[in-house]
Image: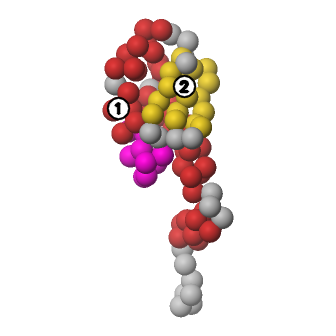
């Protein structure tokens, strides 16, 4: 039997993240974790380092050909990553 002040686990976690101001870091780690899923195995296998700092996603790619192709579709990648995160987490991508 539910009590009047019961909330779902999802709501409780969301509230906890906002109270402790961890929402931004949580979204950033989600972007890094979903990189292989969004970009595919060909890009993910050639990605050696990926991290977020101050709203910028830094990605080290081994292949210069793939790096140049990703540079051309940079805005589309940013849109995909932000849609997946549910908020504007990434403002720019830097390919190293």
| Residue in the image at 62% along x and 61% along y | 21
- How far across and how far down the image is residue 60, in percent? 57, 20
Label tally? 2
Task: Decide if residue 28 is in sight here.
Answer: yes
- Quarter of the image where one finds residue 78: top left
Question: Does 21 appear in magenta?
Answer: no
Q: Work out whether 26 lies above or below 80.
A: below
Query: Measured from the top left, where is residue 42 in percent x and y?
Result: 47, 18
In the image, what residue occupies the spot 45% across and 34% down? Answer: 92
**Residue 58 horizontal/vertical position (percent):** 55, 28
- Residue 15 lies in quadrant: bottom right
Q: Out of 94 and 31, give the one closest to the viewer.
A: 94
Q: Which SS class for mark 2? A: strand
Q: Indicate the quadrant containing the C terminus: top left, top right, bottom left or bottom right.
A: top right
Q: Residue 75: which disc? A: 1
Q: Which mark is residue 59?
A: 2
* Mark 1 residue crowding within 10 angstroms, few (<14) / some (14–19) / many (20+): some
Q: Find residue 29 and report its horizontal and vertical position in percent.
A: 59, 43
Quadrant (top left/top right/bottom left/bottom right) for the N terminus: bottom right
Which residues are the magenta region? 80-89
Real-space CA distance between mark 2 and mark 1, rounded to the nearest whole angstrom: 15 Å
Q: Main secondary structure of the magenta part?
A: helix
Q: Secondary structure at mark 1?
A: helix
């Amino acid at each position: 039997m539910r009590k009047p002040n019961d909330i779902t686990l999802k709501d409780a976690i969301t509230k906890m993240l906002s109270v402790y101001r961890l929402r931004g870091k949580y979204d950033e780690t989600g972007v890094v974790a979903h990189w292989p899923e969004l970009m595919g195995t060909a890009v993910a296998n050639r990605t050696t380092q990926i991290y977020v700092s101050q709203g910028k996603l830094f990605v080290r790619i081994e292949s210069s050909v793939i790096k140049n192709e990703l540079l051309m579709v940079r805005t589309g990648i940013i849109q995909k990553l932000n849609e997946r995160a549910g908020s504007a987490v990434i403002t720019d991508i830097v390919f190293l």
